[in-house]
Image (cartoon, coloured by chain):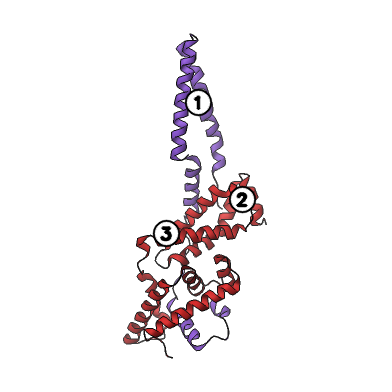
C-alpha cells in the first residue's frame, strides 16, 4: 500500500485535477480489514466441504451400497450361509471403511498461523 | 521462502500447510478487491466473497495447471464472484455508505458548506455507481483503499498503463457528469 498522492499522474488537466481532489476528499474513510476470525471460519468451512460429498454423489453412493448389500445377502443366503456369517461378512467392510475415513480425517484440516 | 508456484505444487500434493500459506498471502488482497467492487458498507459481503473464493480455489486446485500466475487466477475468480454478487438485485441500489464521507478533513466548514459537500459527495457516489465495474473498482482501490497504480494493475490483471487509463477515463466521465450537475468550476 502506498500513498495515492505519490502515484498521482503528473500533467493532469485542471478538470482532471479538480475531480482528483474531489475523489480524495470524498473517499477518505477508514479502511476495513478482514475480521479476526476469518481464517478460523474458512478453516471450518473447508473442513466441512472436504468431508461432505455433494447431493448427487451421496444418492449414488447410497444406491450402490444398498444394491450391493442386498445382492450379497441374497447370494450368501442362496449358498445356505447362516445369518451370523452374512452379518459379519456385510458389516466387516463397512467397519473397515469407517475406520479408514476416521484415520484419514486429520489430514484434511488446515491451520493458519 | 517458497514462491506461490511452489506452494501450489505442495498444496496439490495435499500439503494443507502450503494451502494455508497461500490463503495467508492472498486473503487481504482478495478481500480488498471484493470490497472495491462491492463498495463501502459491504464489508461482511466482501468477506463472504473472500471465503467463497478460497473454497473454490481449494476445490479447483488440482485442475490448476499453472499457465497463469496463481495470483492472477485467484483475483479473476474474486472479480467474477464479486461482480456476480453485485449483480443481484439488492446490491444494485446506491448504498448510502458510499456517501457517508469523512468531513473532518475539511477545515472547519460552516453548516452550509457541510450540507453542500455532503450533497456533492452523494452525487459523486451515485455517478461512480454508473461507471463500468472495472472503473469503479480502480477508483475505490486507488482513492479509498490506498492501492498504488501497480497494485491496481495487479488486482485487475491489466498492465499499469491500462490501470492509469482506467483511472483517467473514470475521472473524465465523472468530471463531465459533475459539470452537467453544476459541480465544476470550469
Q: Which chain is purple?
A: A
Query: Circle 3 sits on which residue?
Result: B85
Numbered disc total: 3
Image location (x, y in percent) of residue B139: 49, 73
Residue A9 placement: quadrant = bottom right
Task: From the image, tell me which residue sits under label 2.
Answer: B18
Query: Residue at point 58% right, 66% down?
Result: B154
Question: Could you tell me residue B120's position as x and y percent?
Answer: 37, 81
The residue at the point 48 percent across, 86 percent down is A15
Q: Residue at x 46, y 83 (%)?
A: A19
Of residues A105 and A65, the one drawn nearer to the viewer in this rendering = A65
Query: Answer yes or no: do the residues labelled 2 and 3 have beta carbons within 8 Å?
Result: no
Chain letter for mark 2: B
Q: Residues within 10 Å of mark 2 (few under 14, many from 20)?
A: many
Quarter of the figure with the N terminus of chain A: bottom right
As drawn, the residue found furthest toward the top would be: A80
Q: CA distance from mark 2 to mark 3?
A: 29 Å
The numbered disc on residue A94 is: 1
Q: Earlier in the sequence, mark 2 or mark 3?
A: 2
Secondary structure of the residue carrying numbered label 1: helix
Amino acid at each position: 500500500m502506498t500513498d495515492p498522492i505519490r502515484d498521482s499522474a503528473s500533467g493532469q488537466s485542471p478538470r482532471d485535477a479538480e475531480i482528483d481532489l474531489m475523489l480524495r476528499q470524498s473517499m477518505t474513510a477508514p479502511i476495513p480489514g478482514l475480521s479476526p476470525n476469518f481464517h478460523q471460519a474458512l478453516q471450518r468451512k473447508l473442513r466441512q466441504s472436504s468431508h461432505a460429498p455433494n447431493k448427487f454423489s451421496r444418492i449414488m453412493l447410497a444406491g450402490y451400497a444398498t444394491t450391493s448389500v442386498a445382492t450379497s445377502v441374497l447370494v450368501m443366503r442362496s449358498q445356505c450361509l447362516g445369518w451370523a456369517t452374512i452379518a459379519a461378512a456385510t458389516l466387516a467392510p463397512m467397519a473397515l471403511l469407517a475406520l479408514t475415513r476416521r484415520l484419514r480425517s486429520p489430514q484434511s484440516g488446515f491451520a493458519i498461523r | 521462502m517458497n514462491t506461490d508456484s511452489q506452494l501450489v505444487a505442495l498444496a496439490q500434493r495435499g500439503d494443507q500447510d502450503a494451502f494455508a500459506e497461500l490463503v495467508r498471502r492472498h486473503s487481504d488482497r482478495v478481500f480488498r478487491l471484493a470490497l472495491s467492487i462491492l463498495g463501502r458498507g459491504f464489508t461482511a459481503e466482501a468477506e463472504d466473497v473472500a471465503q467463497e473464493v478460497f473454497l473454490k480455489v481449494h476445490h479447483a486446485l488440482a485442475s490448476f495447471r499453472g499457465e497463469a500466475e496463481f495470483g492472477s487466477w485467484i483475483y479473476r475468480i474474486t472479480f467474477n464472484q464479486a461482480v456476480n454478487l453485485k449483480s443481484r438485485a439488492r446490491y444494485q441500489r446506491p448504498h448510502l455508505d458510499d456517501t457517508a464521507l469523512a468531513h473532518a478533513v475539511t477545515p472547519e466548514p460552516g453548516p452550509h458548506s457541510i450540507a453542500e459537500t455532503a450533497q456533492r459527495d452523494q452525487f459523486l457516489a451515485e455517478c461512480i455507481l454508473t461507471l463500468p465495474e472495472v472503473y469503479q473498482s480502480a477508483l475505490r482501490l486507488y482513492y479509498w483503499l490506498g492501492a498504488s497504480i501497480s497494485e491496481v494493475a495487479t488486482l485487475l490483471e491489466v498492465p499499469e498503463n491500462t490501470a492509469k487509463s482506467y483511472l483517467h477515463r473514470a475521472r473524465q466521465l465523472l468530471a463531465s457528469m459533475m459539470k452537467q450537475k453544476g459541480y465544476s468550476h470550469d
